[in-house]
Amino acid sequence: MRKALNRLRIGESAYVAQVKAEEPLCTRLLELGFTPGTKVTLRRMAPLGDPLEVSLRGYRLTLNRWDAAAIFVQKDKRL
């Protein structure tokens, strides 16, 4: 089952299934490493839910909630 990255719980991991966003944002997220099949873990979240800190490909990244909503993840690596 696919869900948006901003719907993960803290400490939960999933694999990127798809990035659905307008062209500039989609390109930027792909450049940051959110390519299909990449494992992503939600590390921390601000008290009001924005921003989110995720780890992927050996580094940590902070995203705002709306950008994270454009990244769809799933539990298994199969696309």
Image (tube, rainbow, N blue to C red):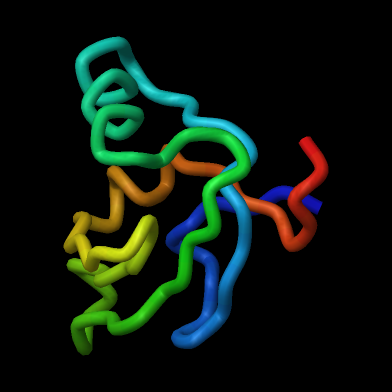
Query: Viewed as shown, does residue 59 lie left or right of 1?
Result: left
* Quadrant in which residue 32 is drawn: top left
- Image quadrant holding the C terminus, namely top right
Q: Residue at x 82, y 43 (%)?
A: 78
Q: Name which residue lies at 33% across and 67% down.
A: 54
Q: Is residue 36 left or right of residue 61?
A: right
- Residue under the image location 21 percent in, 88 percent down: 47
Q: Position of residue 4 (x, y in %)?
A: 54, 51
Residue 6, percent from left and from top: 44, 61
Residue 55, image quadrant: bottom left
The vertical placement of 56 against 50, above or below, is above
Work out whether residue 36 or residue 18 is closer to the camera in this orientation and state it. Answer: 36
Question: Residue 44: x, y in percent?
Answer: 29, 83
Q: Is residue 15 left or right of residue 75?
A: left
**Residue at 57% in and 72% down:** 13
Counting from the top left corner in percent of width and height, residue 12 is at 56, 80
From this view, report whether residue 28 is shown above or below residue 17.
above
Q: How many marks?
A: 0
Single out the residue that lies furthest toward the front.
58
On the picture, is 63 further left or further right than 74? left
View extreme (top): residue: 23
For residue 60, above or below residue 64: below
